[in-house]
Image: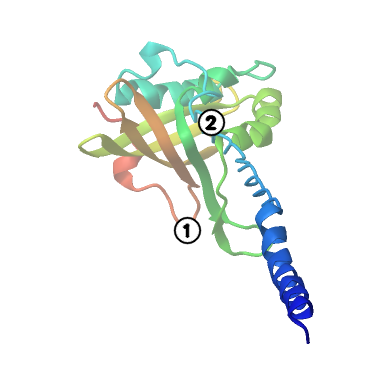
Amino acid sequence: MSVTTRAAVAAALCLSLAAPAAAQDVKPLPKASAPAPIVTTPVPKTVVPDPFAGIPAAKPADVASVDAIVSAVYNVISGDKGVKRDWNRFRSLFYPGARMIPTGRNSTTGKINARVASPESYIEANSSFLESEGFHEQEISRHTDSFGNIVQVFSAYEARHTLKDEKPFLRGINSMQLFNDGKRWWIMTIAWSPETAEHPLPKQYTEKQAR
């Protein structure tokens, strides 16, 4: 190979080696992709309903004392035939979640049972009877125990269709649990049991007592 030829080959080899390097020097760098936006879903605020919102305002005189609220519950469900009861007054006496629990022997099965209901369920089940038949429930006597803000009342009652009836058609005991929140008295629970031949009212509950 002549000197001229060797020089030409060397030059060609240098060009072949330099071309890729040159190409790399001028090739643009790829653009970095933008980060995906972070999408946040707002967490809805939990709205806690006010348990007192549906309770009508009570008459201050009805909830001022134990005597007052016990008298109010007897008074509000009582009335002559055809007399509408003031059910908002009734509702105003009960704490949210209060229960009314009739107990007794089932006439069909013979079993002794209890039915847990709300004041609203009591209204739905009994308003028609109370207003169509006439119903007066009166307290005979009472035994009361108390501690702190709670009171347990055993209240013996008798019921008549009219106040002129000589004898009651029903007697029994209402067991009432009451609560004072520092401002007023509330009824938490009323569980009741009617008098039967098997379970007559104890003597201490059959005569009206001074309180």
Residue at image coords 67%, 33%: 124
Q: Nearer the viewer, residue 88 or 27?
A: 27
Report the amino acid beneath label 2: Pro
- Callout 1: few (<14), some (14-19), or many (20+) C-alpha neighbours within 10 Å? few
Task: Give the quarter of the image for residue 82.
Answer: top right
Q: Is residue 167 visible?
A: no
Q: Secondary structure at mark 2?
A: loop
Q: Position of residue 59 (x, y in %)?
A: 43, 12
Q: Circle 2 sits on which residue?
A: 49
| First-in-chain label (2 vs 1) | 2
Q: CA distance from mark 2 to mark 1?
A: 46 Å
Task: Give the tally of numbered discs.
Answer: 2
Residue at image coords 55%, 58%: 113
Q: Circle 1 sits on which residue?
A: 198
The vertical placement of 95 against 171, above or below, is: above
Q: Secondary structure at mark 1?
A: loop
